[in-house]
Image (cartoon, coloured by chain):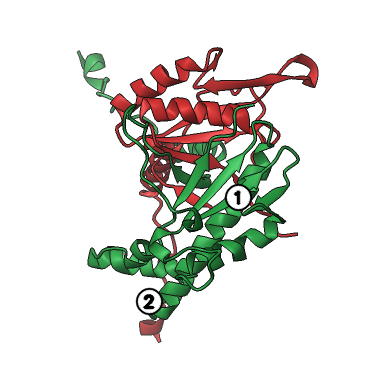
Chain colours: A red, B green
């Protein structure tokens, strides 16, 4: 009988010594994958919906151009403007030089056009014309997945 | 002297029991702030800038499917009033015609789709039309992939990526979409 009683004292603790390490691993993963928002978008960009979507996996290659009505104080909307990075582009000719510089830095550049759905095609075509001049030919009309109704 | 001897060297240890908690807090912060949203959109490649003295290559009128989107977002396909929903079938008929119907393309490799807008055309109308044209190509690619024995086009792409093979479907049915300049007002 004494033989059986000896067996009953097994430790039931889960070793927690490596817990901080596991958490740190997760932490580092999220720190690396986080992209903090670096630009404030000064124009409204409600993206159109589409079905034939492709994903851009490499975020490093992407540069954004925002087009849409300007956000003004008190929820009012102004004229349609073009924004690259942090600044509004007043003269569309500047798009050419800005994008050309970006292309030199990143030859595989993809330009993602975030255009408000109410914008007119005129400004989009003008920007595209400038992109052709700059040589940044890979573009992407950013759109949302269609919600089936 | 005996008093001094009693002073033992204390071990300098940092308490590590709260380390996990601190790490957890940081973890939760980054979990909350991370957005793993992949950017999605309709990809296009713009035509390169035309050289001054080089004439664009001649294209037969019948190989081009002309789609016009006007200021109200209304659609003309080959000068016939149409609807956005009908474009998909029109594009498929055009590309897979192979000379059968004189109104559509001579052969698949030569088929072109041209989208023309006015300067006042709303952007979402344009994207809607472009989307339908792309969907037509996607569906044709899917059909080709199924004919080759794959469940869909995506699995075909992964299969040829593994084999380092050429994308035969894309070579056969090239997505040739051109964005035409609006007429000068």
Q: Is residue B179 above or below residue B54?
A: below
Give how far across and how far down residue A37 sits, in percent. 52, 28
Name the residue at the bottom extreme: A1
Report in which chain the residue with disc 1 lies.
B
Q: Residue at x 59, y 34 (%)?
A: B182
Report in which chain the residue with disc 2 lies.
A
Element class at badge 2: helix
Asked whether the viewer can see residue A56, the reply is yes
Disc 1 to disc 2, C-alpha distance: 87 Å
Between B116 and A132, the one nearer to me in the picture: B116
Residue with the mark numbered 1: B67
Between B126 and A89, the one nearer to me in the picture: B126
Q: Residues within 10 Å of mark 1 (few under 14, many from 20)?
A: many
Q: Between tags 1 and 2, which lies in front?
A: 1
Q: Quadrant of the N terminus of chain A?
A: bottom left
Element class at badge 1: strand
Q: Is residue A138 left or right of residue B113?
A: left
Instruction: Specify the label residue B113 is tagged with.
Output: none
Residue with the mark numbered 2: A6
Q: For residue A42, which quarter of the picture?
A: top right
Q: Is residue B122 left or right of residue B20?
A: right
Give how far across and how far down residue B117 sits, in percent. 62, 39
């Amino acid at each position: 009988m004494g033989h059986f009683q000896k067996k009953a004292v097994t430790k039931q603790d889960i070793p927690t010594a490596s817990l901080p390490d596991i958490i740190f691993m997760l932490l580092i993963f999220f720190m690396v994958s986080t992209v903090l928002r670096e630009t404030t978008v000064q124009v409204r960009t409600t993206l159109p919906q589409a079905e034939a979507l492709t994903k851009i996996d490499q975020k490093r290659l992407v540069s954004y151009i925002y087009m849409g009505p300007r956000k003004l104080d008190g929820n009012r909307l102004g004229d349609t403007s073009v924004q690259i990075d942090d600044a509004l582009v007043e003269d569309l000719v500047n798009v050419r030089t800005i994008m050309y510089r970006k292309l030199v830095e990143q030859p595989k550049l993809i330009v993602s056009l975030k255009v408000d759905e109410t914008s007119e095609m005129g400004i989009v075509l003008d920007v595209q014309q400038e992109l052709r001049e700059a040589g940044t030919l890979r573009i992407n009309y950013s759109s949302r997945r269609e919600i089936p109704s | 002297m005996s008093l001094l001897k009693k002073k033992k060297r204390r071990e300098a240890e940092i308490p590590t029991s709260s380390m996990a908690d601190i790490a957890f807090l940081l973890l939760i912060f980054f979990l909350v702030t991370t957005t793993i949203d992949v950017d999605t959109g309709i990809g296009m490649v713009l035509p390169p800038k035309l050289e001054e003295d080089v004439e664009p290559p001649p294209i037969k009128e019948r190989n081009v499917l002309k789609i016009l989107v006007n200021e109200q977002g209304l659609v003309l396909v080959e000068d016939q009033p149409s609807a956005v929903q009908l474009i998909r079938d029109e594009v498929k008929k055009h590309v897979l015609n192979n000379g059968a119907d004189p109104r559509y393309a001579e052969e698949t490799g030569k088929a072109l789709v041209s989208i023309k807008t006015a300067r006042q055309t709303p952007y979402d109308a344009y994207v809607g039309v472009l989307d339908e044209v792309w969907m037509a190509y996607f569906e044709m690619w899917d059909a080709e992939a199924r004919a080759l024995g794959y469940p869909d086009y995506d699995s075909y792409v992964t299969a040829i990526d593994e084999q380092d093979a050429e994308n035969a479907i894309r070579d056969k049915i090239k997505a040739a979409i051109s964005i035409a300049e609006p007429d000068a007002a």
